[in-house]
Amino acid sequence: MEKDKNLAVLIDGDNIPSKYIKEMMLEIAKYGNPTVKRIYGDWTKPHLNKWKQVLLEHAINPMQQYSYTTGKNATDSAMIIDAMDILYSGKVDGFCIASSDSDFTRLATRIRETGQSVIGIGEKKTPDPFIVACDRFIYLEILHTDEEEDGSEKTTTKKSPAKKTVENINPKTIKLIRSTVTDLADEDGWAFLGEVGALIQKKRPSFDARNYGFSKLTPLIQATGKFEIDQRDGGGRYKLIYIRCKE
């Protein structure tokens, strides 16, 4: 996604913890301008009280949806209907759906069928069908910092720092990178890293170097020890990075 694209950000308030909101909105800003920001839930329910404190700060519109009956999620239906209305209004270029619920799988698929991009954001418990239905899926756990949620420097109560779940660079991940390099390699086996990263994202929407404890793809690839890296002059301030598989 281009950074100047207008995005519709739709948040499942029943499914996304409010503690992630700051980092989530900063992440979304990397992919476009969030011109529509809505969160859905039954605001008469006590469990959404924490959300009420941060909505004004981030200019997010709360959308009231009463629960019509026990065991049925009316919030999901309201989000889906609004998403389709926004889609056909032609006012946005892409969507960000924040939920860990597989009920939005068909919505993501339908939006992509129109040629618009979909970013999914949710916890690591998110079912695979929703993940692969998105162009990119970002785990909330890799965004959340260990800072005090209210930004204060209180030291009276010691809290154990929240541990981020860091995945191991397993053979499956190395195979994914290797096969992608092979797909894009020239006659000498070299592939441009930017194209490698883009193709990996298409193959596995949830792939993110931060899942493995790295800020970027380059140090992750270096850590595997399975690839050669060549930095070439791009004619400007930036170097062009190429990689190839070691024998």
Image: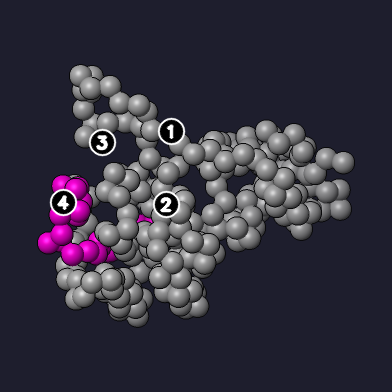
For this rendering, which residue is in front, 53 or 160?
160
Is 51 in the magenta?
yes
Crowding near pointer 2: few (<14 within 10 Å), some, many (20+)?
some
Residue 221 drawn above or below residue 80? above
Identify the residue under disc 4. Answer: 49
Give the spatial CA distance, label 1 vs label 3.
Answer: 15 Å
Identify the residue under disc 2. Answer: 123
Q: Which mark is residue 185?
A: none
Q: Secondary structure at mark 4?
A: helix
Amino acid tagged 1: Lys
**Which span is picked out in magenta?**
32-54
Residue lying at the far top of the rendered structure: 156
Identify the residue under disc 3. Answer: 149
Amino acid tagged 4: Asn
Crowding near pointer 1: few (<14 within 10 Å), some, many (20+)?
few
> For the point 18% across and 61% down, which residue is it?
62
Give the spatial CA distance, label 4 vs label 1.
Answer: 25 Å
Amino acid tagged 3: Glu
Query: Mark 4 or mark 3, which is nearer to you?
Result: 4
Q: Secondary structure at mark 2?
A: loop
Amino acid tagged 2: Glu
Left or right for 246, reference 232? right
Crowding near pointer 4: few (<14 within 10 Å), some, many (20+)?
few
Tell which circle, 4 or 3, labels the residue nearer the N-terminal end. Answer: 4
Image coordinates for residue 120, horizontal then vertical, percent: 44, 60
Q: Secondary structure at mark 1?
A: loop
> For the point 45% across and 70% down, which residue is it?
105
Image coordinates for residue 37, horizontal then vertical, percent: 27, 61
Q: Which mark is residue 163?
A: 1
Left or right for 163, reference 238? left
